[in-house]
Image (cartoon, helix red, strand yellow):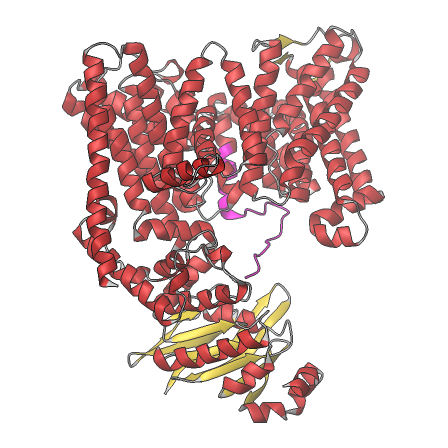
């Protein structure tokens, strides 16, 4: 029982990371129907920026987190402007190929500059290096931090989406781009803003992972990126609460498979979930079927 | 002799009843019109007839070769093989292929050689390909589009694109042809040409034709009978003159188009 | 009308004979150069890489370019061919074993293609892409972990007997290109293309789109299996990580650069990219950065790639030359 609860805690921590990334995927897909392959690499760069801030600039965690999020936000907007915007009316396959190109560019470009070896985050002090026990359960300070920050960010996101004008614009553009434009909404700015928030969340996830697992490398974004995408699809692609649910679900599944089964299979299980979802209910848990008009 | 009967056909999408208890009958060789205001469900009826989606309830029965067969819910390619062909409201040609290839694809039934023949271009491949090629060119020639056979479909002028859609449907050797707004976007001269063409193919290809159209001059001129749809239901049925003076129909259209016919 | 068809049939024979003559010449010339050791092992290994990539690109093009099904898991099929052939030749090291292993590998890849294709091919565009990617990853994990006793897991199989020589390479590469081209120029090929162009219209014209999608997928998988078997029977060593997402992307880049829907485009771009890779061998990261930028640039400025959906032929080349002459002030 205790092991189960312990795994639960681990799963929720990992799930928070996936949820943060899945949100970026789902928002971008909701608004321009693109699977942003490069999203995992923005996350990776978030981790590297955090590493850079904490190791070389000797900044504390929170300033580093902020800088990470800002840098990633700007990166996301830039990528959109250069690579995706010109293809907004092209076929989905074209944009997908472009996204793959951006992903390769970021991964190997980073590798070219920082060499493929893993780096370690500097040792953490204070709260972050602590562990707290409740009976036989161990809560690491890092885990509490991840969960708290994720909750704060998700609450912030919900606020933006539900209560602000730009949030309303995001929802409008994802429902019907032309109608939104006719209503006076600047589609370009709304899309840029979506990328901005999504990438900021990915950046946060990156630095949190750097703190949690300690080691980062230029190719670290690929697998988690794919899994976060599976999470977004599971919850219902394009649906924000879905991404949150999906993220935690995948995180828990992965931890449970590792803990109770064989950690070798955990990737396979996640992909199997993807295949099953796509076959059984492609619109995801919270999704609704849409029909092509003939 | 009926060739197609539709019995209490209904289709709902979520809560919306797009087609409601529609019953129709087509006699062999007839040219029947299906009209109604926008959103009445006409194209949905076509989609149900051609298997794009299954009906929520109701039956569609095809009478062919002295047999009757229920075809509702079957897949589109099966229904096509049984002899029902269609054109689309928003032209769905194979844009990046030539006129000739558009027709050849529809003639696929005539190329029944297997995979091995495809890979190795055997003798049966050669013979059947030649046949398909000749038949396709001949069909294009009869319908006066053979001079453009190597032109890409997307480069054709609009009127010829619509013409090609009809030719392509004919290539599947149907007994029933469903035309979805074939005259949409055409000027009066083109419409007149189209009218002639429809009459001509009905006779020479021994077809039964069901026609959705908004252009009343076309409908009144060539349809022998007309069904009128509104809000998914049949509100009237009869000859053109009967329909013209039908109060309910005039109401549904607010009298504008009827007055102009 | 009949006249038109008859003369074109004689022309067909002539152009066919011409093509085979050219191919035979290429085969003989290269064989001579190899025997004279002018083409040494190093150069020949580049040939092998080019030919494997041609087979992979042409087979992926069939699925993605001609039938419009975006598959990101092609390397998975390659690995099935590679492992099957390797495991067989490690036990039965002979020409028969090699050919048997190769054919078995291709057939197994095709079977997996059916298994993967049937449930996933109803998905569209990006969803299909991710599903195929997932499938390939699952296959990789199978070879790495589940079948560890058989495949030696992550460490891979080494000491695979080398049976691939120029003759086999030539036969399989030319064979793949010819067979796939023939398929394209048949009723089945046209049906596949119609599915790409407009699936709903194709169905309305009597074409069972699922059948043809699976047909293209399985055929592509078959030839990818052959490519994998050739790989393992030349390069001595295979490991699961060689056949991951990166490999699938490699093949995708070749197809996109050459033109989705052009066989000759795939051949040309396979050669070009193999040369670039060899040139950049000492800078592997740079190569991938260039690939990434290449993909972006192609999609932004020339999405149809080098050849678009046209094929290289004497008439096309004549038109190009005429076009150039005209532009330079000459009279065509």
Q: Residue at x 62, y 10 (%)?
A: A114
Asked if the stretch drawn in magenta spans residue A291, the answer is yes
Q: In this view, does B83 lie above or below C238?
A: below
Q: Residue at x 58, y 22 (%)?
A: A105
Q: Is residue B87 above or below residue C226?
A: below
A198 horizontally vs A264: left or right: right
Q: Which residue is drawn at 71% across and 16% down?
A: A49
| Residue C296: x %, y % from top left | 57, 30
| Residue C118: x %, y % from top left | 39, 46
| Residue A279: x %, y % from top left | 49, 46
Residue C150 in view of the camera: no
Q: Is residue A280 above or below residue B239?
A: above
Please identify the quadrant where the N terminus of chain A is shown. top right
A161 horizontally vs B96: left or right: right
> Going by the picture, which residue comes out furthest to the right?
A164
How many numbered marks appear? Answer: 0
Asked if the stretch drawn in magenta spans residue B257, the answer is no
| Residue C169: x %, y % from top left | 25, 24
Please identify the quadrant where the C terminus of chain A is shown. bottom right
Q: Residue at x 78, y 19 (%)?
A: A67
Q: Please name whichever residue, A244 or C107, is drawn nearer the observer in this view of the structure.
A: C107
C251 horizontally vs A191: left or right: left
Where on the picture, by quarter, is residue C240?
top left
Q: Give the range drawn in magenta.
A: A271-294
Residue C35 in view of the camera: yes
């Amino acid at each position: 029982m205790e092991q189960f609860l312990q795994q639960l805690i681990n799963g929720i921590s990992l799930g928070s990371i996936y949820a943060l990334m899945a949100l970026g995927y789902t928002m971008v897909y909701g608004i321009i129907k693109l699977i942003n392959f490069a999203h995992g690499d923005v996350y990776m760069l978030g981790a590297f920026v955090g590493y850079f801030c904490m190791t070389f600039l000797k900044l504390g965690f929170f300033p580093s987190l902020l800088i990470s999020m800002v840098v990633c936000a700007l990166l996301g907007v830039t990528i959109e402007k250069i690579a995706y915007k010109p293809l907004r009316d092209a076929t989905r396959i074209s944009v997908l190929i472009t996204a793959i190109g951006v992903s390769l560019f970021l991964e190997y470009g980073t590798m070219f500059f920082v060499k493929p070896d893993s780096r370690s985050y500097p040792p953490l002090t204070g709260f972050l290096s602590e562990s707290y026990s409740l009976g036989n359960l161990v809560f690491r300070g890092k885990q509490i931090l991840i969960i708290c920050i994720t909750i704060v960010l998700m609450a912030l996101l919900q606020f933006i989406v539900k209560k602000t004008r730009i949030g309303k614009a995001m929802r409008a553009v994802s429902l019907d781009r032309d109608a939104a434009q006719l209503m006076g909404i600047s589609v370009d700015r709304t899309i840029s803003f979506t990328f901005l928030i999504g990438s900021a969340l990915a950046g946060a996830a990156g630095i949190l992972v750097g703190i949690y697992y300690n080691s980062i490398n230029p190719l670290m974004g690929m697998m988690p990126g794919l899994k976060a995408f599976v999470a977004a699809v599971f919850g219902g692609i394009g649906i924000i609460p879905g991404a949150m649910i999906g993220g935690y679900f995948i995180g828990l599944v992965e931890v449970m498979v590792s803990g109770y089964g064989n950690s070798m299979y955990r990737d396979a299980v996640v992909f199997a979930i993807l295949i099953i979802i796509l076959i059984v209910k492609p619109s995801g848990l919270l999704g609704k079927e849409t029909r092509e008009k003939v | 002799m009926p060739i197609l009967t539709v019995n209490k056909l209904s289709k709902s999408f979520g809560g919306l009843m797009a087609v409601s208890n529609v019953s129709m009958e087509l006699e062999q060789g007839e040219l029947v019109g299906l009209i109604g205001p926008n959103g009445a469900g006409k194209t949905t009826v076509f989609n149900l007839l051609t298997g794009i989606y299954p009906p929520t309830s109701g039956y569609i029965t095809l009478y062919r070769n002295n047999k009757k067969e229920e075809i509702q819910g079957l897949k589109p390619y099966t229904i096509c093989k049984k002899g029902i062909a269609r054109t689309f409201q928003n032209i769905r040609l194979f844009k990046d292929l030539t006129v000739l290839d558009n027709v050849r694809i529809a003639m696929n039934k005539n190329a029944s050689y297997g995979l091995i023949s495809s890979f190795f271009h055997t003798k049966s491949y050669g013979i059947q390909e030649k046949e398909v090629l000749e038949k396709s060119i001949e069909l294009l020639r009869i319908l006066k589009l053979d001079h453009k056979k190597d032109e890409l479909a997307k480069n054709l002028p609009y009127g010829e694109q619509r013409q090609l859609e009809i030719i392509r449907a004919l290539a599947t050797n149907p007994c029933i042809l469903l035309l979805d707004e074939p005259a949409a976007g055409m000027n009066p001269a083109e419409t007149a040409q189209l009218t002639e063409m429809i009459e001509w193919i009905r006779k020479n290809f021994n077809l039964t034709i069901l026609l959705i159209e908004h252009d009343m001059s076309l409908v009144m001129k060539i349809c022998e009978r007309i069904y009128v749809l509104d809000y998914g239901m049949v509100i009237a049925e009869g000859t053109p003159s009967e329909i013209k003076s039908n109060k309910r129909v005039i109401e549904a259209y607010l009298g504008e188009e009827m007055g102009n016919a | 009308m009949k006249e038109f068809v008859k003369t074109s049939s004689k022309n067909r024979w002539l152009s066919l004979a011409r093509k085979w003559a050219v191919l035979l010449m290429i085969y003989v010339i290269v064989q001579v150069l190899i025997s004279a050791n002018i083409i040494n092992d190093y150069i020949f290994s580049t040939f092998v890489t080019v030919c494997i990539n041609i087979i992979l690109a042409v087979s992926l093009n069939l699925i993605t370019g001609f039938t419009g099904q975006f598959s990101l898991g092609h390397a998975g099929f390659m690995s099935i061919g590679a492992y099957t052939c390797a495991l067989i030749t490690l036990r039965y090291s002979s020409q028969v074993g090699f050919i048997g292993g190769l054919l078995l590998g291709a057939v197994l890849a095709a079977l997996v293609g059916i298994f993967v294709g049937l449930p996933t091919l109803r998905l569209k565009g990006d969803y299909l892409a991710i599903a195929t990617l997932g499938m390939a990853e699952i296959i990789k994990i199978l070879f790495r972990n589940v079948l560890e006793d058989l495949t030696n897991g992550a460490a891979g199989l080494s000491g695979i007997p080398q049976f691939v020589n120029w003759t086999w390479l030539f036969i399989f590469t030319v064979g793949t290109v010819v067979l796939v081209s023939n398929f394209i120029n048949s009723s089945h090929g046209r049906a596949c293309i119609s599915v790409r162009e407009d699936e709903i219209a194709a169905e309305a014209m009597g074409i069972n789109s699922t059948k043809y999608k699976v047909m293209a997928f399985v055929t592509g998988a078959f030839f990818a299996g052959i490519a994998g078997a050739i790989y393992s029977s030349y390069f001595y060593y295979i490991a699961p990580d060689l056949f991951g997402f990166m490999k699938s992307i490699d093949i995708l880049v070749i197809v996109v650069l050459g033109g989705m829907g052009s066989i000759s485009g795939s051949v040309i771009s396979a050669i070009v990219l193999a040369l670039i890779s060899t040139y950049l061998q000492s800078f592997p990261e740079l190569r991938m950065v260039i690939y990434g930028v290449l993909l972006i640039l192609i999609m932004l400025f020339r999405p149809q790639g080098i050849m678009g959906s046209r094929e290289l032929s004497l008439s096309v080349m004549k038109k190009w030359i005429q076009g150039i002459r005209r532009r330079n002030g000459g009279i065509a």
